[in-house]
Image (cartoon, rainbow, N blue to C red):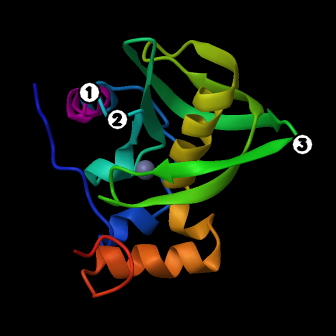
Amino acid sequence: MAILPIRVFGDPVLREACPEVEEIDESVEQLVRDLVDSLPRPGGAGLSANQLGILKRVFVYEDQGEVRACINPRLVSVSEETEEELEGCLSLPGVAVPVPRHLNLVLECLDLDGSPKRLEVEGWLARVFQHELDHLDGRLILDRTDRESRVQAIQLLQGEPGHVGTG
Ligand code: ZN
């Protein structure tokens, strides 16, 4: 059991793109165990490898009480229809900003045993997958929100006096 610290805003590893895993070896199995252990429950919907400082294209997500791994996830298709909702991030403590996401998507990835999976998801889980895919590409919700929300969020994260979270 290894609960590792989750990297937070300002750590450059959150801006790194995570290259695909070439072989599911011991280190990938260890990474998935660490991601599962480190995902806060309740409260965490998903966690990506670079949030633990590791540059591999792997994330875990919680679905109906179970935490599952996606290795080398790849978006196959997304719905045209999008929906904007407030979204938070374990790496941006205290921040919630409006983020538009596709309502439905199809994603392909590998299981821990290397077998291919094809996942068709909608709503909340589709939002979680898009959030984690963004992490693996070095992208944060700050890049997906409107300018004003971004400015306020960064003020909050940097602890500067602003209009959010004071008092
Ligand atoms: Zn996040």
For label 2, the SS is loop
Tag 2 near tag 1, CB within 8 Å: yes
Image quadrant where one finds the C terminus: bottom left
Q: Amino acid at mark 1?
A: Arg
Q: Amino acid at mark 2?
A: Gly
Q: Which residue is mark 2?
A: 44
Q: Which residue is mark 3?
A: 80
Which one is in front, 144 or 136?
144
Direction right: furthest residue: 80
Give the Cα distance between marks 3 and 2.
27 Å
Q: Which mark is residue 41?
A: 1
Crowd tier of the residue under label 1, counting other residues whose Cα lies within 10 Å: few below 14, some 14–19, many 20 or above = few
Q: Quadrant of residue 69?
A: top left
**Residue 54 seen anywhere in this rendered image of the structure:** no
Q: Amino acid at mark 3?
A: Glu
User: Which residue is at a point 63% across and 64% down the rendered structure image?
Assistant: 144
Give the Cα distance between marks 3 and 1.
32 Å
User: Which residue is at a point 26% across and 75% down the rendered structure image?
Assistant: 166
